Image: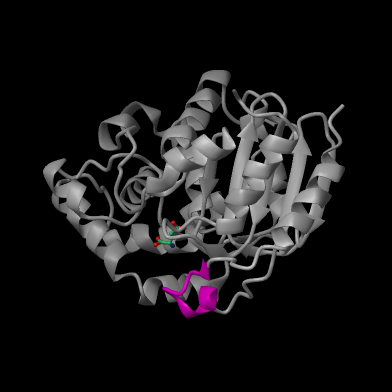
Amino acid sequence: MINYQEILDKIYNEVYAEQYRGKVADYIPALARVPVDKFGMAICTIDGREFIVGDAHENFSIQSISKVFTLTLAIDKAADTLWQRVGREPSGNRFNSLVQLEYENGIPRNPFINAGAIVVTDSIFEGIGKTKNNILRFVRELSNNQTISFDEEVAESERIYGDRNRALANFIRSYGNLNHAADDVLDVYFHQCAIPMSCIDLARGFLFLANKGFSPIANKQILNIRQAKRINSLMITCGLYDAVGDFVYRVGLPGKSGVGGGILAIIPNQLVVAVWSPGLNEAGNSLLGTLALELFTTYASNSIF
Ligand code: GLU
């Protein structure tokens, strides 16, 4: 049996020896304040084992990782129309790019770029308060942590500095691909990005994706096998912004990152691994988080390939 604790400890020591840790996201003040030397990692296996190292219990802003939670809700609720409104191809552009949207008539390339995630949130929208509650209830249930809540300061910062997301939402709406008022959908979107969670919360919360759609944490079938396969597949092709090729090349797993410095990755039928290091590389992915996951699949000789 692979000794995951030994591997995590080894990775921790190696990562701490790195001199350059990347640059903390600074587009909103609440994220710019996070100390760059934080590092945590957690593994949850589908048979109930958990391993942690470093700041694995400390909360950070999940940011774009929330797009996987909302896509999961949408795939279950709005699947019939969802794929007419959002594509399934890597974008090759920045996560908040506007250019492609114009020549592709307001249909975002995939659900993990901002434009696509805004459409996904629109597809599960049932009023601001209710949608926010639905998301929170879902995340709490999946992670078995009732203390998870929105960070209102981060959400407000996202709103204040959200001109580009407002541009995206209004542009999509001009093509008839947003059913609700742009500001209402964005209110939910800014809040979902502003959920603080720890590595252990995330590793537990996404266990259903490693386990054919069944969450051992919530003791519930969240998605069917085919839906779970599809979300994993989308993470392989679109989960790490426009650096997904490099990530999959190095790590060999489906994953999803956020500008808070978190990355979650799945080994189907085995485990979820979540890592957090707030310093980002140029593509907006956690620099040391990516390195840690690369070391993880290398030392464990365990990936999807
Ligand atoms: N709240 C960020 C935005 O919408 C999320 C970015 C991210 O994590 O990729 O710009």
- In the picture shown, does residue 201 fall above or below 207? below
For residue 25: magenta? yes
Residue 186 falls within the magenta-colored stretch: no
Say if residue 83 shows up in the picture.
yes
Residue 205 visible in rendering:
no
In front: 161, or 76?
161
Q: Quadrant of residue 267?
A: top right
Q: Is residue 73 above or below residue 41?
A: above
Would you say 236 lies left or right of 179 here?
right
Asked whether 301 or 199 is in front, the reply is 301
Indicate the quadrant containing the N terminus: top left, top right, bottom left or bottom right: top right
Q: Is residue 181 left or right of residue 18?
A: left
Q: Dividing the picture into quarters, in which one does residue 237 lie?
A: top left
Q: Nearer the viewer, residue 11 or 75?
A: 11
Protein image colouring: one colour
Q: Which residue appears at 62% of the width and 42% of the height?
A: 294
Q: Quadrant of residue 59?
A: bottom right
- The total number of labels drawn is 0
> Where's residue 242, x and y in %?
37, 47
| Identity of the residue drawn at 27% across and 37% down | 85
Looking at the image, which residue sits at the far top?
226
Q: Name the residue at 30% across, 44% down.
A: 92
Q: Is residue 295 above or below residue 132?
A: above
> Which quadrant does ligand 1 occupy?
bottom left
Residue 248 x, y percent position in the rendering: 51, 36
Position in image of residue 177 (x %, y %):
22, 44
26 w.r.t. 46: above or below: below
Residue at 70% from the left image edge and 44% from the top image edge = 203
Nearer to us in this view, 140 or 243: 243
Q: Position of residue 105 (x, y in %)?
A: 14, 42
State which region is magenta.
Answer: 23-32
Q: Where the C terminus falls, by quadrant?
A: top right
